[in-house]
Image (cartoon, rainbow, N blue to C red):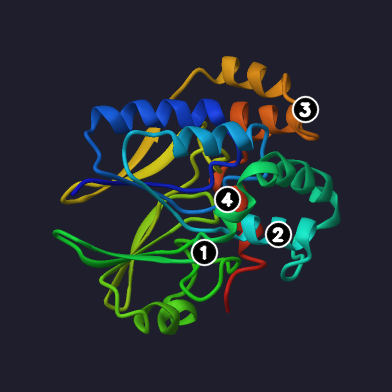
C-alpha cells in the first residue's frame, strides 16, 4: 500500500494542488493529512480539495486545529501568540462555518499496519503532545521515552516544517516536512511510503502562487506570500530558533 503523508499545508492551495498531481501519478492508495490545514490563506479550499479527492484520505488534528477550537469555541487552551490571533480566527471561521463537527472529530493520532514497515503511528508533533518541538538535532535522550513507549516500528510527524529521517531507540522517526509553509528551500514537502521512505519535494509556480495568495482576504496574505512561498527562512535559521524551545 502506497501512502502519502501531507503535513502542515497551512491553507497553501497552490502547493497542495501541485502535490496532489504527483500523488495521482504515483498511484497512491491512501493520503494521511497530519494536521495544520490552517491557519493560512485558503483553508476552506484546501480542506475541500482533500475531501473531494478520489483517493481515500485520513485526517488527524494538529496543534493549529486544536488552537482554533480554543480560540473560537473556548475548547481547550489557547497556546499561540497574540500576534497571530486575527489570522487564526479568520482561518478557523472559513472552515468551521460548515466543517466544524467534521474537524472536531479528527483524532490526534492514527495507527496503521503498513506492509514493509509494521505498525506506523502518525502524529502531529510527538505521540503525546501536538505542540512539542524536536528536530533532527534534538539529543536522543530527550525524546527516547516518548517514542519507545509507543510500541510502533515507525512514527511519522511534522510540526517543525523540516524533513528528517532518524532512529530514536528502536523507532524510525520521519518528519514529512511542510506542504505549504516550508523552512528551507522553496517548494512543497511531503512523504511517500512506497516500500521505502521517500522524502519528497514538489516544485510549483511560486510567483503564480504568491499572486493568488495576495488576492485572498487572509490577514497575513502578503507576509505569507513572501515568507512562506517565495523566500522561506532557512533550515539553519529555524534550527537556531527551535533549539531554544525544543524538548530537554
Identify the mark nearer the N-term, 2 or 4.
4
Note whether 161 is above or below 81 in the view shown: above
Residue 160 in picture, x, y percent from top left: 55, 55
Disc 4 packing (10 Å; few <14; some 14–19; many ≥20) = many
Determine which residue is flagged by label 1. 125
Q: Nearer the viewer, residue 202 or 53?
A: 53
Q: Is residue 202 visible?
A: yes
Residue 198 in picture, x, y percent from top left: 27, 45
Identify the mark nearer the N-term, 3 or 4.
4
Task: Please tell me the numbered disc located at residue 69.
Answer: 2
Real-space Cα separation, disc 4 to disc 1, in angstroms: 11 Å
Real-space Cα separation, disc 3 to disc 2, in angstroms: 21 Å
Q: Nearer the viewer, residue 136 or 71?
A: 71
Determine which residue is flagged by label 4. 36
Residues under numbered marks 2 and 4 in contact, where contact means CB atoms less than 8 Å apart: no
Determine which residue is flagged by label 3. 217
Q: Is residue 239 visible?
A: no
Amino acid at each position: 500500500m502506497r501512502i502519502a503523508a501531507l503535513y502542515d499545508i497551512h491553507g497553501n492551495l497552490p502547493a497542495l494542488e501541485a502535490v496532489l498531481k504527483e500523488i495521482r501519478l504515483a498511484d497512491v492508495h491512501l493520503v494521511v493529512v497530519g494536521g495544520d490545514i490552517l491557519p493560512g490563506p485558503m483553508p476552506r479550499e484546501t480542506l475541500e480539495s482533500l475531501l473531494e479527492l478520489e483517493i481515500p484520505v485520513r485526517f488527524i488534528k494538529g496543534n493549529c486545529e486544536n488552537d482554533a477550537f480554543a480560540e473560537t469555541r473556548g475548547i481547550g487552551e489557547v497556546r499561540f501568540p497574540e500576534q497571530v490571533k486575527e489570522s487564526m480566527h479568520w482561518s478557523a471561521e472559513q472552515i468551521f462555518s460548515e466543517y466544524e463537527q467534521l474537524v472536531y472529530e479528527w483524532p490526534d493520532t492514527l495507527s496503521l499496519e503498513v506492509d514493509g514497515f509494521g505498525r506506523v503511528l502518525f502524529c502531529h508533533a510527538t505521540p503525546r503532545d501536538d505542540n512539542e518541538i524536536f528536530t533532527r538535532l534534538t539529543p536522543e535522550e530527550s525524546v527516547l521515552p516518548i517514542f519507545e513507549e509507543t510500541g510502533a516500528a515507525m512514527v511519522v510527524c511534522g510540526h517543525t516544517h523540516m524533513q528528517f529521517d532518524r532512529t530514536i531507540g528502536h523507532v524510525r522517526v520521519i518528519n514529512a516536512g511542510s506542504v505549504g509553509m516550508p523552512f528551507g528551500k522553496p517548494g512543497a514537502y511531503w512523504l511517500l511510503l512506497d516500500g521505502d521512505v521517500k522524502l519528497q519535494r514538489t516544485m510549483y509556480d511560486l510567483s503564480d502562487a504568491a499572486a493568488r495568495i495576495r488576492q485572498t482576504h487572509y490577514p497575513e496574505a502578503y507576509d505569507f506570500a513572501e515568507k512562506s512561498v517565495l523566500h522561506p527562512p532557512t533550515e539553519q535559521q529555524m534550527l537556531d530558533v527551535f533549539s531554544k524551545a525544543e524538548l530537554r
